[in-house]
Amino acid sequence: MLMAIKRTAGYALSGDATADTVTAMRDTLDNNRRGIRALLPFAGPAVIASVGYMDPGNFVTNIQAGSTYGYELLWVVLLASLVAMLFQAMSAKVGIVTGRSLAELCRDEFPRPVVVAMWIGSEIAAVATDLAEFMGAALGISLLFHLAMGWGLLITGVVTIGILTLDKKGFRPLEIVIAVLITVIGLSYLCELFIAPPNWHAALFHTFVPHLHGNDALMLAVGIVGATIMPHTIYLHSGLTQNRAPARNDYQRSRLVRFSNREVVIALGFAGLVNLAMVTMSASVFSKKAPGISDIAVAYHTLTPVLGAGAAALFLVSLLASGISSSVVGTMAGQNIMQGFVGFRTPVLLRRLITMVPAVIVCMTCNPMTAMIDSQIVLSIILPVPLVALVVLSSRRSVMGRFMASRKLIGVAVVATAVILVLNVLLIWQSVAS
């Protein structure tokens, strides 16, 4: 099995895998492939989008949730993951059916002043997202290799640009690298759960039984939602479906949507499990030893005497993989947003510098953790914009044709959007008040 994975990864990075993947997708759409062989070629867009649900912002909120309230907020993680699946599936469907990204559709379907406001807000969100992810990776490098934060920033920038250049070989090599980094995150937390076994009965109970212990728990629950559902991945997912194997007719579109929905459930389900593992590990280790932790560096230094250097190193490895993969995806999202709203792309190096420079300035002038938390507030403000746009466009027959979302689905999406909007208002109010 391991040799097969190595051969697959090596082949994928050779540059030939993209063409062969497209051929395999065409064979499937023409009913020449069945079973798991039919699904695998379509894996990729949701895998990349899932990175946004395992970024350093999730580390901060999940560690704080587990260390402060133990297992009590696990149900919030589960609920946020289910809502994320809904909107990512809707975004992918829009891209598959129309052949255009969500940003492109917004440019074509909404009044110009609205489009300009959406573009500016989305760019701010992309920068805020990428800044937090970039700094998370830099912090991981700094702590893991005992380097100055400046070196961590520089190494993160170089590695991110290097991974992004794989896009020149087609979409498959980049997807393989992202999938490997996601696997590293998942395996790291699986090992952590073996090192520090949680109270499985309490964890299972609180995963499915809602419980909020006071206003502080409510605000932290809002923070988990804000850190989980990301505006840039909503935009990006629709764009990732464009350059793969466009459907030739409605039958193929229907099959593509089905494959996409299955991938969303698997990829976002995995991301949800990782987030549940983060909270569970934090509850098991920190809730009694160091309650109320909200700083990644403090969490690392606390893990070392409690579980040993190996467990602490695994924590940083997962943070590093999270930061680098999400930084790559954040840059991709920024490209997709700009290309969709204004019709042109920026060079990868320039796009990387747009977020590197603010990160360096922030690192030199304030606490990185404070900057990461503030970035989540910015995302909370912007998040309802793509959600509302997605709901509106999915319900328009002129855009989606016979693939227009059902009233029941739109109703669920509207309720979810309204709840997220209210929760984000509460989060912003608390942040301003404090």
Image (cartoon, helix red, strand yellow):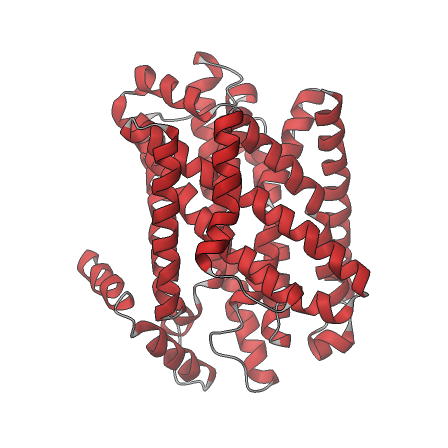
Image coordinates for residue 369, horizontal then vertical, percent: 51, 27
Image coordinates for residue 401, horizontal then vertical, percent: 72, 79
Nearest the viewer among 257 and 322 is: 322
Nearest the viewer among 360 and 430 is: 360
Residue at coordinates 58% horizontally, 31% vertically from top-left?
Answer: 373
Q: Is residue 153 left or right of residue 419?
A: left
Query: The C terminus appears in which quarter of the rendering?
Result: top right
Q: Compared to 274, does 119 lie above or below?
A: below
Nearest the viewer among 239 and 292 is: 239
Image coordinates for residue 158, horizontal then vertical, percent: 35, 48
Q: Compared to 64, does 110 lie above or below?
A: below
Which residue is the extreme one toward the top? 289
Which residue is the extreme one toward the left? 3
- Please tell me how many numbered marks the rendered image carries: 0
Nearest the viewer among 154 and 27 is: 154
Residue at coordinates 63% horizontally, 33% vertically from top-left?
Answer: 223
> Does residue 58 appear in the picture of this structure?
no
Image coordinates for residue 288, horizontal then vertical, percent: 46, 13
Query: The N terminus appears in which quarter of the rendering?
Result: bottom left
Q: Compared to 98, does 419 lie above or below?
A: above
> Does residue 428 appear in the picture of this structure?
yes
Q: Is residue 429 left or right of residue 31?
A: right
Q: Is residue 213 left or right of residue 205?
A: right
Residue at coordinates 47% horizontally, 74% vertically from top-left?
Answer: 244
Q: Quadrant of residue 40?
A: bottom left
Residue at coordinates 59% horizontally, 65% vertically from top-left?
Answer: 339
